[in-house]
Amino acid sequence: MEKNKQKEKIYIRTVSTFFAIYLVLMIGFSVFLVFQEKKAADMELQTYALQINNRIENIIQNYLDNDENITDISKVKEELLQEHSFLTLMGSEVAIFTRDCKLLFNTNNYWLCSYTKYKKGNTHYIGYSYLNPKDWFSEQEIREIEGYLYAMPKARKIGDLSGYSVSLEGFWVDDMMIIPEKVTVTPMYAQSFDKKGNISSSSGIHTDDIVYFSDYKNTSDLPYFEHGSIIEDNNGNPNTERRIGLRTMVTDEAQLKKAINKFTGLRSMTQRIGFLTYRYYLPVPYQNTARVKDDQSLESSFWTVIGRDVNIGEKCFPTLGFVWVSCFITFSAAALMLARQTYKTYKQQEELENRRKEMTSALAHDLKTPLSIISGYAENLQADIHPEKREHYIEHIRENIKRMDRIIHKMLELTKLESSPIKISLEDVALADVCKIIIERYKPVWEDKQINVSLEGEAPIKADHSLMLRVIDNFFVNALDNTPEGGKISVRILDDTLEVYNSGSYIPEDKIEEIWLPFKKGDTARGNSKGTGLGLAIVRKILELHKFSYGVKNREEGVVFWFKFQ
């Protein structure tokens, strides 16, 4: 239970830290991206404003007198109407003012209409005019007609409603303004689809026409035309609250005068009108040049004002969405991996601490016995008890000092292997030769115990020669310590494995994994064992450095220690 709580605590702490870093980075990146998009929108508007101003200049200059006054305003408006789709690009609104800031022309919420003004031979000359729906229809009728004009039904099969055709059936033109006789709405139905599923053709059924009458009676002998079309605004319905607000801003004379007083070049003014929606306002002088008057104020023959609402969020959200999601996945994966590794490190440290405590206790236990013996014999020598055993006492003191020295030496050796990075010098090692050296080294011991020692097989391996000597030395000494008199030790070198078998001992199954740890032995009576309890721990560390697998298993009448070198 305590382990689960600790694990949960580590995971929560790690994930929370990563999540906090993630939020800080993402918020910072989002703010930066919004700022960059605002700058990009400003630059885009400036480029668009210059293009607009150049087009307006090309139109106006054809109708100017020497004093730069327009000679035929109707012609100018007619040509400007032909630029309607460009003037309202991306939902922009444009207004043109005279030098004294009087409104000359502006995009508006009127319906733009096109019709054949006249024709010569087979050539049709198209005319454009505005229709102010409020002059001829009720608000309910206007909403209905605009609903048809901007309807976007989704046709999925032939015969489905695909939209509406809104046309003028009979109308008069009075100074660029259309006076409708009637507006006809014809439902259109899908006739065919292309390979992508888009409508390629549709047709209307005039028996389903919806007709709106203006009830106008022509008493002024105005020119009459039989057919025209109401052009759909590419930016959607121009009568939305936001478009009306933008249009009001660009046509405001007071706003322009204030902007001229602060004019320092092509710099737009912005205001936030939504969470991430900004309204841009940019006045541009005629021919992109403003003159300084005697009173230091600026003057231009004409001023073009461009306004545009830009939803920065729409521009940023695709990038932000991808970055936020991808970074969330990356940070989550990194947090989980780090949390798992942190918990693993914590467990390893906990195990190392427990092992350290256990080793300290075991070391104290193993040193206690020889120290007690040394102390007892030293007291006997000091008190001159049994003088005839003086040599016996001295010999046992020496033996126990050697035993303590072995324990401390092995402890230092293990500590060095575990704490310091060991550089392995790989070379060709003949295992048979190494085994012969070890067997010969301990020949007096195994001959004295009448143990039968055999060696078979040979194999060259890539390993550190000195470390392999220590591995086989520890294996062999462990076998000697646990083989009874008259027993057997067999060393076998197979194609990929070295085995050291000794008879006469058995390791309890519940202890078989622990014997590789310091001071862990198959024989629980530690004090009665000749070994230090560190030899197999040293073997384990050396074999792990070589990335050799190893193990031990009980066999009938004995135990086999092994390691694989391939």
Image (cartoon, grey):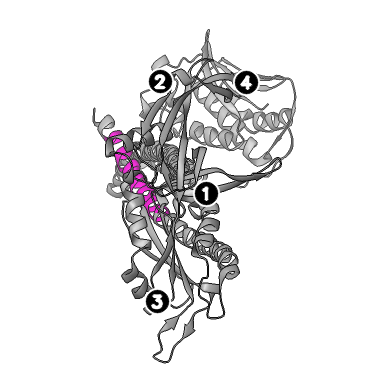
Assign a secondary structure to mark 1. Answer: strand
Q: Which residues are magenta?
A: 6-30
Evaluate whether residue 310 shows in this view. yes
- In percent of width and height, residue 394 lies at 41, 44
Cα–Cα span, label 2 and label 3:
102 Å
First along the sequence among labels 3 and 4: 3
- In percent of width and height, residue 377 lies at 33, 42
Q: Residues within 10 Å of mark 3 (few under 14, many from 20)?
A: few
For badge 1, the amino acid type reads: Tyr
Please identify, in this view, whether the residue under mark 4 or under mark 1 is nearer the observer.
1
Quarter holding the C terminus?
A: top right
Evaluate whether residue 448 shows in this view. no
Badge number at residue 499: 4
Please identify, in this view, whether the residue under mark 3 or under mark 4 is nearer the observer.
3
Please identify, in this view, whether the residue under mark 2 or under mark 3 is nearer the observer.
3
Residue under label 2, please give it: 511
For badge 2, the amino acid type reads: Lys
First along the sequence among labels 2 and 3: 3
Cα–Cα span, label 4 and label 1:
101 Å
Does residue 296 show up magenta in the picture? Answer: no
Judge from the rendering whether residue 64 lies leftward or rightward of residue 140; answer left or right: right
Badge number at residue 100: 3
Q: Residue at point 38% right, 43% down?
A: 390
Cα–Cα span, label 1 and label 2:
99 Å
- In percent of width and height, residue 76 lies at 53, 62
Assign a secondary structure to mark 4. Answer: strand
Cα–Cα span, label 4 and label 2:
20 Å
First along the sequence among labels 1 and 3: 3
- Check if mark 2's residue and mark 3's residue have beta carbons within 8 Å: no
For badge 3, the amino acid type reads: Asp
Assign a secondary structure to mark 3. Answer: loop
